[in-house]
Every structure is written in structure tokens, then in C-alpha cells.
Amino acid sequence: MMSRVAETIYWLGRYMERIENHTRLINTCFHDYHEWSGCELERQRHWEQLLTILGESQGYAERTDLSGEQGILFYLTLDAKQPNSIVSCLAKARQNARSVRERIPDFLWESVNDTYHWLNGQDSASFAATTPYLFYQQIKERTALFYGIADSSMLRQSEWHMFNCGRYVERAENMVRILHMIVDQYQKIARNTEPAVSYQFLVTGLKSVDGLEGFRKFHAADMQLAKVFNFLMVNEVFPRSVLFSLLMLEQHLTVMKMSEKDFEISASKPFRTVKKLQGWLLDFSDDLTDTTQMEAFLQNLLVSYNQLGREFSKSFFCEEV
């Protein structure tokens, strides 16, 4: 597989995962904002947290033409001028899928293309007129269809493994950012509000990653920051934990190393970094009960994930000569 094709498929996986992540976070934030029983300042914090997680606080602040709830929803969803919006990510995913149509199933291309045209047909007026839950539910269903097609029809060859490498690199990085926000905001909330508010904040954090039911199977209603942190970081059976993503990366890189001679050397450095990160998580995460330690750990982890992304670029995506 040529480096250009590998990079395109890798980023197809990343963009589609990013769309799913953004959709879930926005939908959770919207519902909790309207269900929150605290004061308006506390309710408004939901949107501030969302913009922080997605790295869009400064970008949105510079948009003087947008304001309020509808402005934030438009900015994160339909704003084509915003490179990290759902519609922008979908446009990039569609472009990538189109450029490798001969390497992916036809139905997979049709799924991306159909979703792109559907979302591009929405505007601020129709968006405001519909129920946000139904709107974001449609995006979730369309991304679920995309992954279902990929899972059932992609050959288990290098394209499949590279696609999933992109998917799990993106998923783990998103989870680290979410955890960073949870730890940072929890300190402020726990100092200034009643315990019930802190409890609800952790519930919201788990709901934003579809982890509330899974957490309760391990910890029932024992909603403590350290236990939430540990669950989202190193639980081996929760599919959105950081460790689970690393285990999936290890699996796909291992198959690539064994199946293609060209990848035996290319995959070695990212593989070593993935194994190092796994060991690091398992060695330290159980001992982290102090929020200062958690924040330092997450910051170092985010730096390591950025390094892993660069290693993928250097190892797999250098131009052919």
C-alpha cells in the first residue's frame, strides 16, 4: 500500500471517529444543559466545557457573529468556515474516501457521500426548526451505519488495519482531552458547590462517552473522581477507555507487521510507543488519586499521543521517491 493511500485511509478513520465523538458530546451537553437544575451560571458552564474539550474556546470567542446556544451549536456542527466542525470533518472524510474509492467497498463510499449531501443540505434555519436530539441522533445513526458497513465488508487487509489505527488514535486522544476537562472542572465544582452537583457532573462526564452503564456495572453508584478516572483510563473491556484503544492499536499494528513486508519496519516505532504507553498507564493510573497528579499525568499522556501521531506520519506517510 502506497504511503499516500495509507495516509488517506488513516485520516478517513480519524475524521469519522471525530464526527462521532463531536456528535455524542454535543448531544449530551445539550440535554444536560436543559435538564440542569442549578443556577444559570452553572448551566452555562456546560457549553464552556464543551468548547474547551474540542479546543474551540478561542475560535468561538473570535466569532462575534454568533452567540447563545444556537450560535454554539451552529459553530460546532454546520459552520463550514470552522475546520473542526462536523460538516468540515465530514467534507474531509468524503474527500479521502473518494480518493481511495478503489481501495474501499462501494457501500462505504456511498455511506459517506450520502451523509455529506444530507448534512450539507441543512442550514441554520432548518437546524433551528428541528429537535436537536433528532438531528444529532440522525448523525449518530449514519456514523453507526458507516462503521457497520466497514466492519462487515472491508477485507482484513492493510487498508482495514490502517483505517482502525486512525480510528483508535483519534479515540484515545479525545478521551484524554475529556478526562483533562473532567479533572480540571471537578476541582472547581467540588470546592464551590454541594456534593450532589459534583456527583451530577461526573455522571454527565460518563454519559458524554457512553460510559455510565458500564461504570455502574463495576462501581454501582460509587461516583468518585478517582474511580471514574480509572474506569475511563484503564478499563480493558470498556471500548472507549484509553487502554482499550491502545490494545486495539497494538493488535492492528501487529497484524500489519506480520502481513506486509513493507510494514515490518514502518510499524516498529509506533508499535514500541504503543507498548510503552500501555505499560505507563498500568503502572501509574491506579496510584493517581490527587487531581494535581492526574492533570500532570494527562498532560504528559497528551504529549505522548501527539508524538505517536507524528510517528505514524514519519513511518507510514513519507512520500515515495
Image (spheres, grey):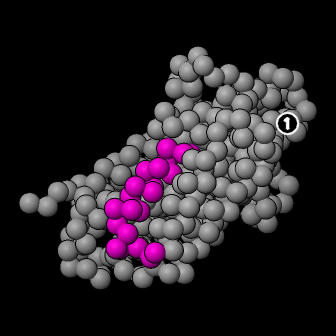
Percent position of residue 59, x then y: 52, 26
Q: Which residue is mark 1?
A: 34
Residue 84 within the magenta-colored segment of the rendering: no
The reply to whether residue 295 is in sight is no
The reply to whether residue 147 is in sight is yes
Percent position of residue 64, x then y: 58, 16
Q: Residue furthest top?
A: 64
The structure residue drawn at horizontal position 80% and vertical position 35%, both measured from the top left corner, is 33
Above or below, comparing residue 95 to residue 292 in the picture: below
- Magenta stretch, main secondary structure, is helix
- Judge left or right: residue 156 versus residue 297: left
- Judge left or right: residue 302 versus residue 216: left
20 or 226, nearer to the observer:
20
Magenta stretch in the rendered image: 86-106
The structure residue drawn at horizontal position 63% and vertical position 66%, both measured from the top left corner, is 144
Q: Amino acid at mark 1?
A: His
Q: Quadrant of the C terminus?
A: bottom left
The structure residue drawn at horizontal position 77% and vertical position 52%, both measured from the top left corner, is 134
Tell me if mark 1 has few (under 14), some (14-19) or many (20+) residues whose alpha carbon lies within 10 angstroms of its own.
Answer: few
Q: Which corner quadrant of the image does residue 183 belong to?
A: top right
